[in-house]
Image (cartoon, rainbow, N blue to C red):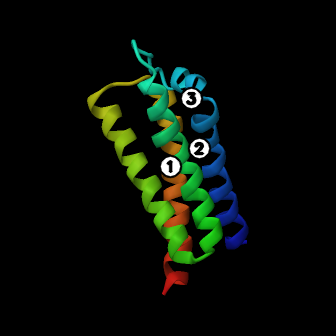
Amino acid sequence: MINALNVAAALLTIAFGLFGFLAPAHTANALDLVPTKSTMGLSEMRASVGGLFVVTGAAVLWLNNPMAYVMLGIVYSGAALGRFVSVALDHPPLAKALIFGGIELVLAIWLILANMNRAS
């Protein structure tokens, strides 16, 4: 059961990343980001919202080690932390921020707690 949920979390990470990697304009729009006079924003979407998540999820699957899943959880905890700090300081659209942050938090908690004892 733990292995199946770990794999599902890694595949979900890859799927999230594929949106940013293959459809950066759509992803930017979904995140309320506005393009400027250059395409550097699309490059950033492909890199930080896309490729980073695709490769991280793929590496976790390839390594297939509990500590790799813990590290993926730590990555998600950083994303959730940033999201919730933004809710407090930036006042983004609350429902969208809480949904995204909630998904990140659930993945972080699962990946860390389910795999920490298995990693030793």
- Which residue is label 3 attached to? 24
- Above or below, 2 against 110 in this view is below
Residue 110's place in the image compared with 105, above or below, is below
Amino acid type indicated by mark 3: Pro
Q: Residue at x 59, y 43 (%)?
A: 17
Q: Position of residue 29 (x, y in %)?
A: 54, 20
Tag 1 secondary structure = helix
Under circle 3, the secondary element is: helix
**Residue depicted at x 57% and y 35%:** 20
Kindly identify the residue that appears in the image at 49 percent across and 69 percent down: 70
- Cα distance, mark 2 to mark 3? 10 Å
Secondary structure under tag 2 reads helix
Amino acid on which disc 1 is placed: Leu
Residue closer to the observer: 19 or 2: 19
Which of the two discs, 1 and 3, labels the residue nearer the N terminus? 3
What is the x, y in percent for residue 111?
A: 54, 65
Badges 1 and 2: C-beta atoms under 8 Å apart? yes
Relative horizontal placement of residue 62, taking residue 36 as reference (left or right): right
Q: Residue furthest top?
A: 37
Residue 30 drawn at (x, y percent): 55, 24
